């Protein structure tokens, strides 16, 4: 599993995940559990790997130094 989520993407995912997760504390009733969806962006931000990005061959990490393209 190689990283496919760049730094800026990880920051955005972490902030969005926290915002969505806060719904657990802000909403009442059964609607509050929709906030658990925020765990997905938080997890992908923490580990730096996003399965849908891998399936769609998307990489926001950028190129590594010393990489020679042929």
Image (cartoon, helix red, strand yellow):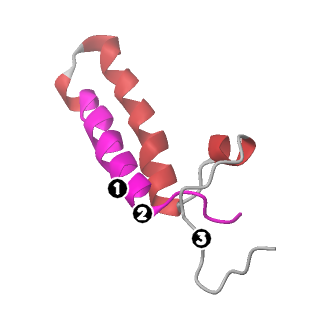
Category of crowding for the residue at label 3, using alpha-carbon neighbours closer than 10 angstroms: few (below 14), some (14–19), many (at least 20): few
Q: Secondary structure at mark 1?
A: helix
Queried whether the magenta region covers residue 21, the answer comes back as yes
Callouts 3 and 2 close, C-beta under 8 Å: no
Q: Nearer the viewer, residue 35 or 70?
A: 70
Residue plotted at (45% across, 43% down): 41
Labelled disc at residue 7? 2
Range of the magenta residues? 1-24
Dot 1 alpha-carbon crowd within 10 angstroms: few under 14, some 14 to 19, many 20 or more: some
Residue 40 in percent (x, y) is at 49, 41
Dot 2, how many residues are within 10 Å of its Cα: few (below 14), some (14-19), or many (20+)?
some
Q: Main secondary structure of the magenta part?
A: helix
Q: Which mark is drawn over residue 55? A: none
Q: How many marks can you see?
A: 3
Report which residue position mark 3 lands on.
63
Q: Quadrant of residue 26?
A: top left
* Residue at which label 1 appears: 11
Inter-mark Cα distance, 1 to 3:
19 Å
Residue 70 on the magenta span: no
């Amino acid at each position: 599993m190689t990283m496919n989520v760049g730094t800026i993407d990880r920051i955005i995912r972490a902030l969005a995940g926290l915002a969505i997760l806060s719904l657990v504390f802000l909403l009442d009733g059964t609607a509050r559990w929709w906030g658990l969806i925020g765990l997905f962006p938080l997890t992908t931000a923490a580990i730096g790997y996003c399965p849908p990005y891998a399936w769609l061959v998307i990489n926001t990490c950028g190129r590594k130094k010393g990489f020679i393209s042929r």
